[in-house]
Image (tube, rainbow, N blue to C red):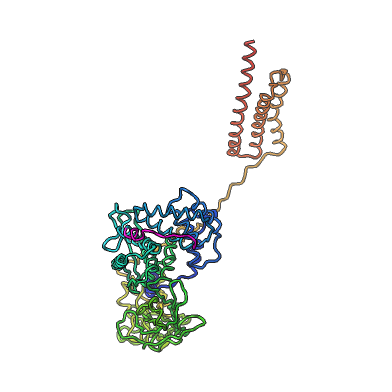
Amino acid sequence: MARRLTGFLVLLLVVSICEAAFLFQPISDSHRSAALELFTPDHGSFKSLEETYEALRTFQILGIEKKPDLTATACRSISETVGSSSSTAKDFFYALKANGIAECKIDKNASKGIISRLNAAVSGASSLLDFYYSVGGLVLIKDQSSEADVHLADADGVFRSVKAFSQSDGRWRYSSNNPESSAFAAGIALEALAGTVSLASSEIDQSLISTLKNDIIKLFDSIEKYDDGALYFDDKLVDGHEYQGPLSTTSSVLRGLTAFAAVTAENLNLPGDKMLGLAKFFLGIGVPGDAKDFFNQIDSLACLESNRVSIPLILSFPSTVLSLTRKDSLKVGVSTVLGSEVPSVTVRLVGAFASGSKDASLVESQELNFDKTSGLHILNDLPKSIDVGSYTFVFEVVLHEPEPEEFYFTGSQTKVPISVTGLIKIENSEIAVLDSDLGNIESQKTLDLAGKNAISLSANHLQKLRLSFQLTTPRGRSFKPHQVFLKLRHESKVEHIFVVGNSGKQFEIVLNFLGLVEKFFYLSGKYDMELTVGDAAMENSLLVAIGHIELDLPEAPEKAPRPPPQPVDPYSRYGPKAEITHIFRAPEKRPPQELSLVFLGLTILPLLGFLIGLLRLGVNLKNFPTKPVPATFAILFHVGIGAVLLLYVFFWVKLDLFQTLKLLGFLGVFLVFVGHRILSHLAAASAKLKSA
C-alpha cells in the first residue's frame, strides 16, 4: 500500500508540471556539447564529403571554436574529388559545399573542368536529383569563385523541366517514371529552381514564378500540426527507400523555401505563424541523438534565423517556477531560434488564468521592464492576485520599429504555464479521541506538524479519532494541496490510509472505530500515525510521524477476514545470506619424521637397483645417432622422459592431481613428437643395415 501511495504522489506531481513541455527554448550549450559528441571523425576524417560538410556546417552555425581540426583532411578529400575523372555531380556538389566552409584552394583548370561537366550533367538530367546536384554545384562554384563565368544558357528550359515533376498538391515526384509524390522532393525541387533562377542569363518567365508561388502555398496547406502549435511536413510511407521522416522532410522543405525566397523579389505571402510553427517543431524535438537528424535540426534553425519570409521570435524563460517566499521576479527573454539578439521589443503580460479555470484574467495588462545588463524583460513583483498555485500567463511581444516587421514575427499571444510556490502556514493542528455517543472529547492534544511529535493516545472500538488543521498561503488565503493522507500502521506492518477532507480552511478527518473494526481485521494493539501533506506548489510539503494510538478492539469472529500477507522485501530474499562456518576434523596423527625418511629411502632403492643393473648388463651408446638432427631428437626424447619422472616427484611433494595431469598432457604430446622422429630414424638405419 505504501508503494501505491508513493507512486500516486509522484504521478500527481508529474501531472502538475507536465504542461512545461509546451515551452520552446532556443539553442543552448547542450546542443554544442552534443555536436562535439555526434560529429567525431574516425581516425581524423569522416566517411564521406557529405558527412564532412554536415559536421563543418553544424560547427559553423553553433559557433563552436574548440572543434576537431577537419580542414586538412577535408581539403585533401576535396582535391581528390574535384581532380578525379570518375566523380559524379553529387560528389562535386558536396565537395563544393564543404569547400565553401573549409575554403580550400581549387585549381582554376579544375574549376573549368567541373563547370563543363556540370553543364553537361544539366543537359542530360532526367530526374529531380540530377537537376538538384548539377544546378546546385554550378551555384556553389559561382558563389566561391568571382572569376568563374557560370550561367545557364537555357535557364527557362531547365526551369520548365524541373517544374514538370510538380503535382497539383504542391508535392513533387523524383522522376517521370515514379508516380509517387513527396514533400521531401518538393524541398529539393525548390532548391534546384532557386539555383536555376540565380544562374539565369536572362530573366525567367514571371508566369512560371507565380505558378511556383502557388505551388508553395498549396504545399503549406497540407502541413500537419501538433497540439503545442508545432507544424511539420510528413510523407506517406510508400517506398521505404525514398521515404524520409518528418524531421528530414520538414528540413528539406524549409531549405528549399529559404533558397527560393532569397532569389525572388516577390513576397511569398506565407503567414508568419507558419514559420513560427516550424520553429516550434525544430525546437520541440530537443537534442537528437543521430548526427543526420542533428544536422537537419541545426541547419533548419539557421534557415529560420535568416530568411526573407519571416524570422520567428521565441520567448524563453530562465524559470517557470516562481517562489513567493523568495520573492522571485518573472523574467522573460526574447531571441531568435539560435539565441541571437533581436530588435527592440516590448513584452507585456496581458493575462493570467488559474490552470483549468475559465474565469476572467487575474491581472491587468502590464509591461515588463527591460534590463540591458541581462537582456531580459523583468516583472519584479507578482500581482497580489497571484497566489500559490498553477497558472497560465499570456504574453504579447510588440516590435518598436515598424521596418523590421516584414521579416520578424512575434506571434499574436503566447501562453506559458507558470507555477507559483511558497511556504504554507500550518495552524490549529489538533488530534483528539471522542466519545462515540455524544462526541465529547475524551483526550485532546495539540500538534506541531512542522516539528517533531510523540503523541500517545488510547481508544476502544466505541470511540472516535479526530484530526484537524488549517493551511494558509503567504497571501493569507486557504490552501488545498493535491494530497492529504493519514496513515495508521499496526505493529504487524498492516497499513490503512485515509484521505483527509476539507471544508473551507479546515482540514478534518474523523475515524469511527466501531465502523472500522472489520477493516482493521480486529487487530488490537499499537498503531503508528503518519500524516502526508504534499503539493507541487508547497515548498514545505511534509511527511510527519504524529505518534501512536493504542486500540482495544473486540475479538475477531470466526469468519472475520484475515490480514493480507505482507510483501516480502526483495532485498531480504536476494540479499547476502548468513555466513556458513565449517569445522574440519582434527588431522590424523603423523608418524615420526625418522620413520618417514627411512620409508623414503626404501622407495628410492629400486631406482638405484635399476641403475646398477644397467651397469652390470653393460649398456653402451653405440646405437646413439651421430648426425646433428637425429641426435637432437634423441636428446630431447630422453630429457622428456626425465621431465616426466621429475613431474612424478613434484606430484608427491607439491602439486595436486589436476596440475599434474595438465603438465603431463603437454609433456606427452612433446614425447610423442620427438619419440616418433627418433624411432623413425632408428628404423630407417636398421633397414639400411639389413639391405646391405
448 and 376: which is toward the camera: 376
Quarter of the figure with residue 198: bottom left
Residue 545 higher or lower than 618, as above or below: below
Residue 417 higher or lower than 4, as above or below: below
- Residue located 71% across and 31% down the image: 601
Residue, far left: 168
Task: Name the image quarter holding the C terminus.
Answer: top right
- Give the dominant element type of the magenta stretch: helix, strand or loop: loop
Residue 576 higher or lower than 678, as above or below: below
Residue, far top: 692
Residue 203 within the magenta-colored segment of the rendering: no
Q: Position of residue 604 (x, y in %)?
A: 70, 30
- Residue located 44% across and 66% down the image: 298
Say left or right for 437 vs 280.
left
Q: Position of residue 396 (x, y in %)?
A: 38, 82
58 and 87: which is toward the camera: 87
Quarter of the figure with residue 455: bottom left
Say left or right for 271 vs 542.
left
Q: Position of residue 110 (x, y in %)?
A: 50, 53
Residue 148 within the magenta-colored segment of the rendering: yes
Task: Name the image quarter holding the N terminus.
Answer: bottom left
Which region shows up in magenta?
146-160
Whether residue 269 is visible to the viewer of this picture, yes or no, is yes
Whether residue 495 is visible to the viewer of this picture, yes or no, is no
Q: Position of residue 582 (x, y in %)?
A: 56, 51
How many tags in the picture? 0
639 and 50: which is toward the camera: 50
461 and 177: which is toward the camera: 177
Residue 253 higher or lower than 662, as above or below: below
